Amino acid sequence: MHTERHVRLFRNGRNQAVRIPREFELDVQEVIMRREDDRLVIEPVRKMGLLATLATLSSIEEELPDIDEGMPGLDDIKL
């Protein structure tokens, strides 16, 4: 989508601001803004889901302790 629209900048206190036209609205609450030479780039910040977050973690190499060592098996428990 290569839509263009001429918009004006304005001052909001000490900040320069721009109104984002409806056709350019982003469906997020947070964005990242960066300058690339004389251009401003605005990208949405999307929260990763649990599976995507877990996929970024490195695997655990250490062995976990045997926490039920010395305990009777479930079949050996008398109620």
Image: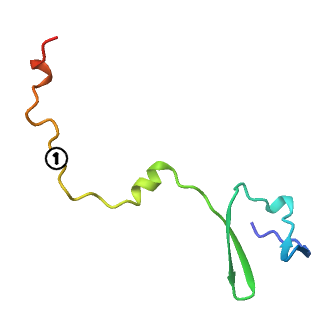
Q: How is the image coloured?
A: rainbow
What residue does disc 1 label? 65
Report the residue at 85% width, 71% height from top: 18
Vertical placement of 75 versus 40: above or below?
above
x, y percent for residue 43:
67, 68
Q: Is residue 78 left or right of residue 18?
A: left
Vertical placement of 21 versus 76: above or below?
below
Looking at the picture, tell me which residue is in the foreground, 6 or 65: 65
Q: Is residue 28 left or right of residue 48?
A: right
x, y percent for residue 21:
86, 63
Callout 1 amino acid: Pro
Q: Quadrant of the C terminus?
A: top left
Q: How many marks?
A: 1
Vertical placement of 35 versus 52: above or below?
below
Q: Residues within 10 Å of mark 1 (few under 14, many from 20)?
A: few
Looking at the picture, tell me which residue is in the foreground, 68 or 20: 68
Report the residue at 19% width, 49% height from top: 64
x, y percent for residue 58:
33, 61
Give the image quarter of residue 69.
Answer: top left
Give the image quarter of residue 19.
Answer: bottom right
Report the residue at 68% width, 65% height from top: 31
Looking at the picture, tell me which residue is in the foreground, 71 or 48: 71
Extreme residue toward the top, this view: 79
Extreme residue toward the bottom, this view: 37
x, y percent for residue 47:
57, 55
Vertical placement of 3 versus 36: above or below?
above
Give the image quarter of residue 46.
Answer: bottom right
Q: Quadrant of the N terminus?
A: bottom right
Find numbered disc 1 in the image and state the secondary structure of the residue it sits on. Answer: loop
Report the residue at 53% width, 55% height from top: 48
